[in-house]
Image (cartoon, helix red, strand yellow):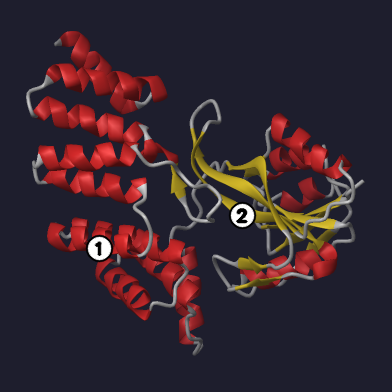
Amino acid sequence: MNTISVCMIVRDEEKVLKRMLDCVKKFADEVVIVDTGSSDKSMEIAYKYTDNVYNFNWNNDFSQARNYSFSKATCDFIMWLDADDIILEDDIMRIWDFKLSKKSEYDVLFLKYVTAYNDNYKPEFSFYRERIVRRSKNFMWHDPVHEVLITSGKKAFLDINIFHAKLEVKSKSRNLEIYKSYIASGNRLSPRQQFYYARELYYNGYIDDAIKNFTGFLDSHLGWIENNIDSCLCLAKCYESKKDYEKALRSLFRSFCMAKPRAEILCEVGAIFIELKRYDDAIYWFKQAKNIKPNLKNGGFVNLDAYNFTPNLQLCVCYFYKGNKKRAQHYHKLAKKEKPNHSSVLFNNKFFELK
C-alpha cells in the first residue's frame, strides 16, 4: 500500500482546522502540522489528531515553512494541504484507490484545486496543482509567497478535487507586503514572482503600478505561457478600470499571439463591447467563447463559467438590448439550466415573468 504523509502549515486556523483534519484522518498514514505563530487554539486542536506538531519561527517565507514541514514526513508520499481546504467523501475514496494500487510508478500526482464552486460543490474555477509527491525525490518549495513546488519525474493527473473553503478573508495586503519586504531587502523578482507581484498590486488597487509590472512581465518574454495569458486578462481589467477600452482590447488580443483563444479572454472582450453598447460585436465574441472547450490539464487558471454560463447570461443581455426578446429568453433559459439559483438568473427569471 502507498503510504501518505499529509503536511500542513497553519497559523490561527481554529475555525477551520478541525474540519480539515476530520477529512485527513480518513486516509492519511501520518499528519505533520507546522505552526507559524498561532495565538488561538489551533495547536490544541492539532494535538488531538497528531503528535507531529512543530513550531516554525515565521520569517515571511512560505516556502521555508513548507520545506520544514516536508522534512518531518516519513511516508512514501507527501501530500500538502491548507487548513481551509476540504475533501469530499468521493474524493477521499479516490485517494484510497491510489493508496491501494500497486506501488505507484509516479513521482508527482496532480489534483484539481477548486477555488470557486456552487452550493452543490460543482466546480466553477479550478486548476491542477502538484499535490502528492514521492518523498524520496526531495522536491523543494521556492518563492516566499505564491510558493511553487519544483518537481520532475513521471507525472499523472487524478480526478480528485481539493476544495478551498475559506470562511473568512485574511489580510488582503499580506502577500503584497511580503513582496515589498522581499524587494526592499535587495532581492530581484523572477519572472514568475513579477507576475504574482503585479497581481497583488492589481488586487490591492495599485492600478498604475500593476500596469507597469504586467507590461514589464509580458515584454520580458520570459514568463510561462499560462501566466502570460492571465497577465493579458488582468492588464485589460486594469485598463477597463481607467475606462481605456482601446488599450484593454489590445491587451486581450495580445494573448492571441501566445496560444489559441481562451473563453475567459473572449468573454472579457464581449464585456467591453457591451460597455461600449456594441451589442453585435459582443454577441460575436460570446458565441465564440461557447465553442471553446476548457483545458484543465495545462496548469493554468480555468474559470469554467466562461465556457458556458457567462456567455449565455451575457447573450441574454445583448439580445434584450437589441430588442430581440425571444432570443434573450432563449439564452436566459440556457443560463438558468446551468445555475438556476444564481442572482442574475433569478433577477432575469423574474423580469421575463413580469414582462
Q: How far from the left and from the top, in percent, is residue 334? A: 33, 22
The C terminus appears in which quarter of the rendering?
top left
Q: Quick one: which residue is furthest to the right in this view?
A: 1
Q: How far from the left and from the top, in percent, is residue 281? A: 14, 43
Q: Is residue 134 left or right of residue 155?
A: right
In which quarter of the view is residue 245 placed? bottom left
Alpha carbon separation for disc pair 2 and 1: 27 Å
- Examine the rendered structure and indicate whether residue 86 appears above or below residue 269: above
- Examine the rendered structure and indicate whether residue 273 appears above or below residue 208: above
Q: Is residue 221 left or right of residue 81?
A: left
- Examine the rendered structure and indicate whether residue 198 appears above or below residue 120: below
Residue 251's label in the rendered image is 1
Residue type at numbered disc 1 = Ser
Q: Quick one: which residue is furthest to the bottom in this view?
A: 186
> For mark 2, what is the residue?
129
Badge 1 crowding class, 10 Å Cα cut-off, few under 14, some 14 to 19, many 20 or more, is: many
